[in-house]
Image (cartoon, grey):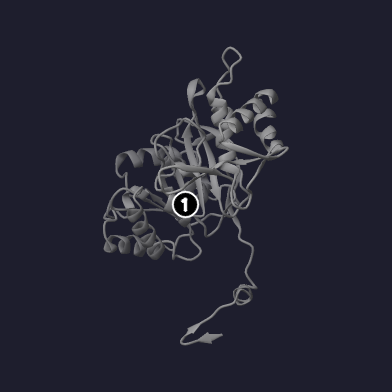
Amino acid sequence: MKNEGFEITKGIDLIESYKNIQEPKILWNGIVEGASGLITGVAKTGKTTFAENLAISLASGRKEFFGFPLDGKPRKVIFIHLEERGWRLVLRSKKMISELNSVELENFSENYFIENQDMPHYLNSDQDWEILRDYIISINPDVVFLDSLTHMCVGEIEKSSVAQIFTMRMKEYILSLNGVTIFTIHHNTKGNDKPMTQDNIAGSRIITQEFDFALGMGNIPTAKGGNYCVMLYNKDAIKDNTNGYKYTFNSNSWVQNIGSENLFNLYNEIKVDGRIDDKNKNLVYNYISSQVSQDSPVVLTSQLKKVFVENNTLTKQTMHTVLNKLEAESKIEKIKKGEYTLKIEINNGEGDSIQGS
């Protein structure tokens, strides 16, 4: 259908144009081939090393990485190091490939590419982006790793104007490469008083709109120590951001999955003198906040029991006491028995706020 020089498209037209489309294949951990996303976290959580492990596993044709299956098909991979080059990178890479068997090493040698040493360290102009794009196109990879987003934008990514310019360039030069899976390493804002969510991603208000998934890597607080990773969101998979995977690195710089645990349990603190620690209240409130959305406006008591009681994070009595306290403070609202939602504050434009649900 056309009207005054432009074509009008109906929904059924779009569906028909893709009638022969195949179901996307899973590359790893729910991430589909052709998706673009982030590996994000605060400093010194091993983001780059984790990404290099995954890249080598894909290029060498391994059948598993971090406890999640791979299909064993060697992929052509390029890893662009904008931050780090030289002897540290070489030494780390030598350690990593020492764990490959002869077949994997041969696949790695054929399929793993890195940046040309003349590649700019910072992408400050369209010309710099063109150099990156053209280099990637010349290799024709299946998977691209970019380290890091900070070196791909001019200014502070938390500023909307900076984030918008970055996403426009990313779309034009990189995300337009059809069929290529893209991992971009990024950083989180500081603070570790509650489980990581996508809101912790620097520039999240705009950045998360443009990427299909985000894998978060963080530090386990308090005396527990260590690190954990969690899929903060994945537009192509069922949402499950309450389960974290603890990890460490061996002497050859390979990440080791040492077990999963409920995130809220990792952040739980012990009750003192029978009183409810504010930490428990924050845990429950943060969980409700992370689950409430336009599509799912309420959280069921059964969900809360599964997350907190069945994982021995809180007792049933403590959970209900915390819910009552949050309701009394007008932070949540009980819609009916067994259903809770957030209590929303609406600003009336004169400095006051009106509470509504």
> Residue 200's quadrant in the figure?
top left
User: In front here: 172 or 91?
Assistant: 172
- The image shows residue 154 at horizontal and vertical percentages of 28, 53
Q: 43 or 270: nearer the eye?
A: 270
Quarter of the image for residue 298 reads: top right
- Residue 142 image position (x, y, % from top left): 49, 59
The three-letter code of the residue at mark 1 reads: Thr
Residue 176: % across, % down: 44, 65
**Residue named by callout 1:** 208
Quadrant containing the N terminus in the rendered view: bottom right
Examine the rendering and report whether any part of residue 259 can be seen.
Answer: no
From the viewer's perspective, tell me whether residue 95 is left or right of residue 69: left
Which residue sits at x=48%, y=26%? 221
* Residue located at (40% from left, 39% from top): 189
114 lies above or below 319: below
Label 1 secondary element? helix
Tell me: residue 9, above or below residue 131. below
Q: Residues within 10 Å of mark 1 (few under 14, many from 20)?
A: some
